[in-house]
Amino acid sequence: MTNIELKDGAASDLQTTVRCPHCWHIFPPDQTLWVSVHPDLRGDERLGDELKRFLPTRFSPEALALDMHGQHCRENACPHCHLSITRASLELPPTIVSIIGSPGSGKSYFLASMIRQMRSTLPHRFFLDFTDADMRCNIIINQNEQALFMRDSEDDLVQIRKTQMSGDLYDTVSFANGRRVSFSKPFLFTVKPSENHPEIASSNKQSRLVVLYDNAGEHFRPDENHPDQPGTEHLAHAQVLMFLFDPTQHPQFRRSCHAISNDPQLGDFGRVYDQVVVLNEAAARIRQWTGMRQDQKDKRPLIVLVTKHDIWGPLIKDQVPVPLTLSKLLLRSQTGRYWLNIDELTRVSEAIKGLLKKKSPEIVAAAQSLAEKVLYVPVSATGCSPIQNERPGVDGLYVRNGDIKPTWVEIPLIYALQRTSRGLITAVKVKNA
Ligand SMILES: Nc1nc2c(ncn2[C@@H]2O[C@H](COP(=O)(O)OP(=O)(O)OP(=O)(O)O)[C@@H](O)[C@H]2O)c(=O)[nH]1
Ligand SMILES: [Mg+2]
Ligand SMILES: [Zn+2]
């Protein structure tokens, strides 16, 4: 028996190489470690007080490794960082998405709203199951999703707190050479054809593991690139890059928006941030870590998500509807399964690019010089403006639960899946749908 097999012995269903979603180390599945179960086996060389990781020599009839005390083990771990690895990481090819953006640009709200929308849009429109691959890794994103969407009263004021640069979102690993490295926790989801999907028969080939990370915006500051805090190294390993551009942090957009919105982020609760520095720093790290030359462009798709569309959308409402609608973008086929209309997505992208070229040309120039293929997508994670909480002692901006209505937040990941998988999402070109 090899070190790791599926319960029915179908070892060929494992990936030929596995990428750890914590430290991005690549290894063959037969190097996968197991996590001991017996409480006497506490104390791991890399993870301190955690249960010992080991390469097994004994297995149960159900192909589960037995630890030194003969206990049946169920959990696997990476041979490099020793952090736990879900079964789906061993079985499914990953679609790793890097999310780049300044502090306050809307990354955490976007992630929570996107996951919320993926859970309904993928099954209902694309006949795809979208599920948590690892509940422990997903605790924080699920808490954020619940904070925004699972409230009893529509009048509840809800908030996602600013992402910190240390704490719950990170795992610290001690390596043999004395280095202590803090890795960002990944959020892991599986996407699989459901029973009415045309690819259901080849589900094992088509399914994907979606890997996402939520960084603090400060991680993208040029002085925050430490080898022992590789919080943004996913940039080098991702299949898709997403840069969140927040018009409310851009001086020229701010001036234009004052006439059309009372959002507090345009006033005392807002600020100006030079977001092109963030994008250029991400580009510099990508070039440094992948060896891509200055005259080369990244072949991976770069999606520029222009966030908080509820605020700036009226600036371009003659070309892109306010609020955003899906009717021309997702087309219903005869079987009831929807297709992604690439022509409409491209039309919207060109319109948004035109607006950015007028108001923030440096962002378009930086994006186009980084990647061969850039798509510009408007999104709104909340669909409404946040408000100040009047309760004494409470800081920051909150959103009224009943007002939250995300728009287009699932589109970037649907496009990413269409680009990185063969048959999960069908793209069609229909002019003037
Ligand atoms: N109007 C509007 N405001 C939004 C939207 N999404 C987020 N915000 C506001 O933007 C602010 C920052 O959002 P976050 O998601 O915390 O930003 P972040 O990029 O995660 O920031 P860091 O964690 O500091 O890196 C919050 O006050 C939100 O209320 C949106 O779609 N519309
Ligand atoms: Mg955040
Ligand atoms: Zn690892």
Image (cartoon, rainbow, N blue to C red):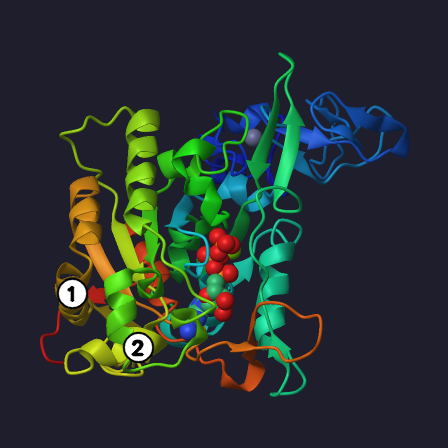
Looking at the rendering, which quadrant does residue 237 occupy?
top left
Q: Is residue 310 above or below residue 246?
A: below
Q: Which residue is drawn at 42% across and 55% down?
A: 203
Left or right side of 113 for 79? right
Q: Residues within 10 Å of mark 1 (few under 14, many from 20)?
A: some
Q: The N terminus appears in which quarter of the rendering? A: top right
Q: In this view, does 380 lie above or below 7?
A: below
Left or right side of 25 for 419? left
Front residue of 86/343: it is: 343
Looking at the rendering, which quadrant does residue 63 occupy?
top right
Percent x, y of residue 280: 28, 40
Mark 2 lies on residue: 258
Left or right side of 102 for 64? right
Q: Which residue is drawn at 56% across and 25% down?
A: 30
Query: Which numbered disc, 2 or 1, marks the residue closer to the eye?
Result: 2
Q: What element carries label 2?
A: loop
Q: Which residue is drawn at 65% across and 32% down?
A: 172
**Visible in this render: residue 256?**
yes
Q: How crowded is mark 2: few (under 14 residues within 10 Å), some or many (20 or more)?
A: some
Q: How many labels does the image show?
A: 2
Mark 1 lies on residue: 346
Q: Is mark 1 on a helix, strand or loop?
A: helix
**Visible in this render: residue 196?**
no
Percent x, y of residue 16: 44, 31
Q: Residue at x 36, y 59 (%)?
A: 413
Residue lying at the far left in this picture: please name it: 431
Give the amino acid type for the residue marked by disc 1 in the picture: Thr
Give the amino acid type for the residue marked by disc 2 in the picture: His
Q: Is mark 1 within 8 Å of ligand 1?
A: no
Q: Is residue 422 above or below residue 308?
A: above
Q: Is residue 35 above or below residue 253?
A: above
Q: The C terminus appears in which quarter of the rendering? A: bottom left
